[in-house]
Image (spheres, rainbow, N blue to C red):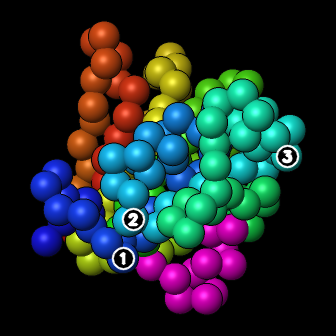
Amino acid sequence: MSSLSLDATDSGKQVLAIGVGGGTVSMGLHDIKPYVNVTAVEIDELVVKIGFKWFGVQDSKYHHTIVQDGVSYLKESAVQGRKFDLIILDACAELGCPAEPFKSMEIIKTFKRLLTWTGSLVIDIMPLPKSPEKALWLKNLQTVLPTCSAIKHRSKVSMYEALPE
């Protein structure tokens, strides 16, 4: 069992992408896995409109774009008992990725509740100088999701993957 397979259709699997941007992540995944249900959540309606007009974002039976605060969507999904096979956090602010609201212990625990037992959380991070806040966030992440790995790009950590167990 895996979050998503490299060789199967993964029909029925659930993916949540927080932070739409130009739609590259959610639409790219939808293109290679057309039967996976992808829900893309973006707080900024203008960003969504730009994605649809200029970057080829299209909603369909298996791709859904929602304009909503990502933290609110996570909390509502947890209350509803939803589960995701893959959660991609690509929500950034001016000072880095992920945006500050996604770094709280409460939200890290919410991510874990939302993952299926074979699910993965992938977090896009903007490499920032070492700081006590960043160290605390990574410690909290590894406390809740003990199986974490950093993926380096051009010698800087740019992504973390975390598993629920």
Residue at 59% in and 62% down: 60
Name the residue beneath numbered marker 1. 12
Residue at 56% in and 69% down: 61
Badge 1 marks a residue whose secondary structure is loop
Report the number of discs: 3
Badge 2 marks a residue whose secondary structure is loop
Dominant secondary structure, magenta = helix
Relative placement, left or right, of 25 versus 160 is right
In the rendered structure, does residue 27 fall within the stretch colored magenta?
A: no
Tell which of 89 and 102 is nearer to you: 89
Q: Quadrant of the C terminus?
A: bottom left
Expressed as whole percent of the image width and height from the top left, the position of residue 19 reads 63, 45
Badge 3 marks a residue whose secondary structure is helix
Residue 36 is tagged as: 2
Residue 45 is tagged as: 3
Q: Is residue 143 visible?
A: no
Expressed as whole percent of the image width and height from the top left, the position of residue 36 reads 39, 65
Disc 1 and disc 2 in contact, CB within 8 angstroms = yes
Residue at 78% in and 50% down: 43
Please state which of the two labelled residues, at mark 3 or mark 2, is closer to the viewer.
Answer: 2
Query: What is the span of residues highlighted in magenta in the rendered image?
Result: 73-83
Please state which of the two labelled residues, at mark 3 or mark 1, is closer to the viewer.
Answer: 1
Expressed as whole percent of the image width and height from the top left, the position of residue 13 reads 35, 72
In the displayed orientation, state which residue is furthest to the bottom.
80
Q: Can residue 81 be seen in this view?
A: yes
Q: Which amino acid lies under the numbered mark 2 shown in the image of this protein?
A: Val
Q: Which amino acid lies under the numbered mark 3 shown in the image of this protein?
A: Glu
